[in-house]
């Protein structure tokens, strides 16, 4: 890394304001120098404008996610499951013009120092590929030249080394790192997940944090979004 700093990397907020506010509370206590966001600020949850406002205020670099693209008609609705489609329709009717323009202007990739940011994959990022297997991850390393590429999209945190190692972070190696999800965990653990990179110590840590799930679930139901979107938050699925 070119500069010594502590960097928080967040992803997949999905309009979950309670989770995002809690994430920034923890980030502030960690003495973080920079915050990066890997997209999917909106979708599924009930607070798209509030979450975008926080991201705009707090994040130094942001890339676009597929739900962000769907909310501005860049990705067809049939790309999403039934819950995603319902939430995107709802989001489109509630998103302010200013925030829609902000989402439209977000890049698909961002490179800063020795870090690449992508929502789904650095390889053909516009295709929103899911990376679950080693062959899928291995192909990504040729698509970025930095030491680390941070991704989200699957909502499942994992560290993959170019040497095939999993969940180990060591000196001098290149990594594809999924930071998990702030607003909708899918690894069976309902807590917030985000990444913390310390470039001086050359360490990376997955941060798991409790938040007020009940507040978001109640807001989802009040917005008349699908009940399942509230229920899944308690289960981390």
Image (tube, rainbow, N blue to C red):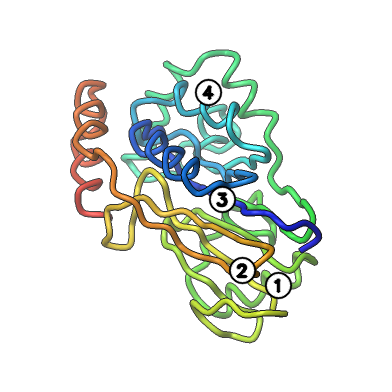
For label 2, the crowd category at 10 Å Cα-Cα, with few meaning under 14, some 14 to 19 and many 20 or more, is many
For label 4, the crowd category at 10 Å Cα-Cα, with few meaning under 14, some 14 to 19 and many 20 or more, is few
For label 1, the crowd category at 10 Å Cα-Cα, with few meaning under 14, some 14 to 19 and many 20 or more, is many
Q: Which residue is mark 4?
A: 53
Q: Nearer the viewer, mark 2 or mark 3?
A: 3
Q: Quadrant of the C terminus?
A: bottom left
Q: Earlier in the sequence, mark 4 or mark 2?
A: 4
Q: CA distance from mark 2 to mark 1?
A: 7 Å
Residue 145 vertical placement versus 7 (above, below): below
For mark 3, give the secondary structure.
strand
For label 3, the crowd category at 10 Å Cα-Cα, with few meaning under 14, some 14 to 19 and many 20 or more, is many
Q: CA distance from mark 2 to mark 3?
A: 16 Å
Q: Earlier in the sequence, mark 3 or mark 4?
A: 3
Which disc is residue 141 wearing?
A: 1
In the picture, measured across the screen, residue 101 lies left or right of residue 17, that is right
Q: Which residue is mark 3?
A: 8
Which residue is located at x 57 percent, y 35 percent? 69
In front: 17, or 187? 17
Q: CA distance from mark 3 to mark 1?
A: 22 Å
Task: Name the quadrant containing residue 56.
Answer: top right
Which residue is located at x 33 percent, y 57 percent? 186
């Amino acid at each position: 890394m070119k500069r010594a700093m502590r960097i928080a990397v967040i992803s997949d907020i999905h309009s979950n304001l309670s989770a995002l506010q809690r994430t920034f509370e923890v980030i502030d206590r960690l003495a973080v120098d920079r915050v990066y966001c890997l997209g999917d600020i909106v979708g599924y949850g009930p607070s798209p404008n509030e979450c975008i406002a926080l991201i705009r205020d707090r994040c130094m670099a942001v890339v676009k996610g597929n739900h962000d693209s769907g909310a501005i008609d860049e990705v067809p609705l049939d790309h999403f499951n039934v819950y995603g489609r319902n939430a995107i329709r709802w989001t489109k009717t509630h998103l302010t013009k200013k925030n829609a323009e902000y989402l439209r202007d977000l890049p698909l990739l961002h490179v800063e120092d020795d870090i690449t940011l992508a929502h789904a994959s650095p390889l053909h990022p516009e295709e929103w590929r899911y990376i679950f297997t080693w062959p899928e991850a291995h192909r990504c390393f040729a698509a970025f030249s930095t030491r680390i590429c941070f991704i989200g999209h699957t909502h499942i945190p994992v560290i993959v080394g170019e040497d095939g190692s999993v969940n180990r972070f060591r000196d001098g190696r290149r990594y594809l790192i999924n930071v998990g999800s702030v607003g909708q965990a899918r690894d069976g653990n309902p807590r917030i997940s985000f990444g913390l990179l310390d470039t001086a110590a050359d360490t990376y840590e997955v941060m798991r944090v409790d938040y007020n799930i009940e507040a978001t679930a109640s807001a989802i139901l009040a917005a008349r979004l699908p009940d399942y979107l509230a229920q899944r938050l308690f289960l981390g699925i």
